[in-house]
Amino acid sequence: MAGILDGKVALVTGAGHGIGRGHALELARQGARVVINDLGGNAKGEGEGRDADVVVDIIKARGGDAVADYGNVGDEAAAEAMVKRGIDQWGRLDIVVNNAGIVRDKAIWNMSVDDFDLVMNVHLRGTWLTCRAAAQHWRAVAKAGSGRYPGRIINTTSGAGLLGNFGQTNYAAAKAGIAGLTLTLAVELAAIGVTANLISPGGLTRISSTLGMGAPKEPDDFGPDEFDPLDPSLGSPAVAWLASDEAQMVSGQCIRAVRDRLSVLKGWHEAAGITSGGKRWKTEEIGKILATDLFGTRAPGLRMGG
């Protein structure tokens, strides 16, 4: 049976384990040829390896096609090379799924600048670098042809980036930054037919296992119809659909996929407001206005934090 991604070529970063591995396997199952990028280090970004080869072998054993890439997404030349790898291998690139990530969790008073910079480098800089390389390619193809190319970008955010989480000022800042990046990409690339969306997935991975949630799981540990609430691939069908031609009209959206629930998330919006009537706000008066009219009893659901 034909898949919804037949003929497409995809790059999935951080695809050696967990969520990225699940995305890569599902994209391949739907007919895409996949560049499997993974540096091969641990959840803290330490070391290198050939973890990508394992996923390539699984895909090929299932009748699909894939190639490994071991580049560091935070390195400009490596990011450009991994985007180009699919083009060199199969003559095109249609889908970029940015999933590569590491954690170095500490409360802010204990976090080093290196811990902050490294997490930002992998998550935010790495996502930006691959998106830029893909956007440059798609824009060139569009200009040389019909003016449009149905490219797909799916970037990874998280609950920490959307809601905050103790001990993750670096990770949360990066994931929030990825959300802002993706919304802007959706605006910038709309004219050439490229969509950009966010996935906020769950699952028991090498990263979440550092929070004491248990041993990580791999998506290929489960059968195609088996449900485990901690399976890291539960959000992968949503990623595959966003990558398809069916999702051409969906851009700038965030899908939260955790356990058996899919949700569409919306960002900052005005929950309550009040006007000064054309006068300048006065510091001596604004506290009462904020506490009572905006955070207090006149604005249900909004309360002063504690």
Image: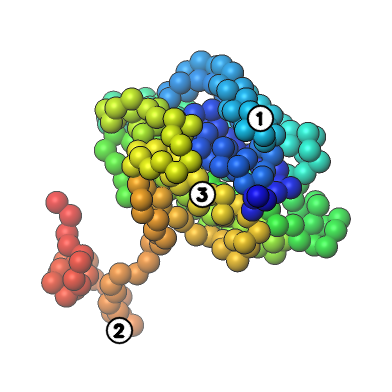
Neighbor class of circle 2 (other Cα within 10 Å; few <14, some 14-19, many 20+) is few
Disc 2 residue type (three-letter): Gly
Q: Which is nearer the eye, 112 or 21?
A: 21
Residue at left 30%, top 79%? 275
- Does label 3 or label 1 sit earlier along the sequence? 1
Q: Which of the numbered marks, if any, corresponds to residue 60?
A: 1
* Residue furthest right in the image: 144
- Does label 3 or label 2 sit earlier along the sequence? 3
Looking at the picture, does residue 80 appear above or below residue 151? above
Q: Which of the numbered marks, if any, corresponds to residue 232?
A: none
17 lies left or right of 161: right
The number of numbered badges drawn on the structure is 3
Residue at left 66%, top 59%? 245
- x and y, in percent, of residue 163 in the image: 32, 50
Q: Which is nearer the eye, 24 or 154?
A: 24
Residue at left 36%, top 50%? 260
121 lies left or right of 246: left
Is residue 177 visible to us here? no
Disc 1 residue type (three-letter): Lys
Q: Secondary structure at mark 2?
A: loop
Quarter of image, res 37: top right
Residue at left 58%, top 23%? 54
- x and y, in percent, of residue 232 in the image: 42, 38
214 lies left or right of 31: left
Q: Disc 2 marks which residue? A: 277
Report the Cα–Cα distance between label 3 and label 2: 50 Å
Looking at the picture, does residue 72 appear above or below residue 96? above
Disc 3 residue type (three-letter): Pro
Q: Disc 3 marks which residue? A: 237
Looking at the picture, does residue 286 appear above or below residue 20? below
- Does label 2 or label 1 sit earlier along the sequence? 1
Q: Which is nearer the eye, 273 or 190?
A: 190
